[in-house]
Amino acid sequence: MKTATDPRHKKRELLVQQLFAADFQKKPRAAVKHIWNELGRIDPLIAAAAPEWPLDKLNHVDLAVLRLAVYELVIDKREPYKVIIDEAVELAKQYGGSSSPNFINGVLGHIQSHETETSHS
């Protein structure tokens, strides 16, 4: 993230906000429907990376940030993983609680290393 006004960061902010809202409404807006449709792939990865935190017990902001980042890491794969993780940590700092950045970083680091191992096997 270069600045808070970076267009890519602004887009991620909007996507996290819409994923957060969709979690309560159970009906995603068009901008996040492509991510929402992949929750069957995304949520098990999050659950496996943080087994001590069932998805229904996770902070909804953290879950929205993780869903976006896991989508970008595992499905979209257009950005380098370091950029995705850095952006997710920044979003966690901005919207989450005091422990959110470390939690997000740990979960995504676990998923990224697992994905790297799987792709090299």
Image (cartoon, grey):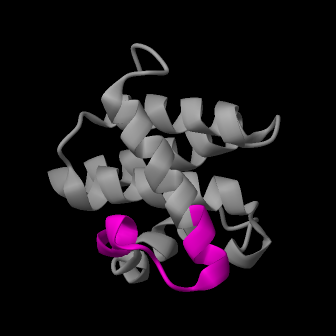
Magenta stretch holds residue 86: no
Does the rendering let one see residue 121? no
Q: Residue at the location (70% across, 63% down)?
A: 60
Q: Residue at the location (46% across, 77% down)?
A: 28
Q: In which quarter of the image is residue 90?
A: top right
Magenta stretch holds residue 34: yes
Does the rendering let one see residue 102? yes
Residue situated in front as seen by the camera: 81 or 87: 87
Q: Residue at the location (32% across, 33% down)?
A: 8
Residue 6 in the figure: left or right of residue 45 = left
Residue situated in front as seen by the camera: 85 or 19: 19
* Residue 74 pos. (x, y %): 29, 58
Q: What stretch is highlighted in magenta?
A: 20-35
Majority SS type along the magenta span: helix
Whether residue 13 is situated above or below residue 23 in the rendered picture: above
* Residue 18 pos. (x, y %): 51, 62
Q: In which quarter of the image is residue 61?
A: bottom right
- Count every numbered label the image shows and give the total: 0
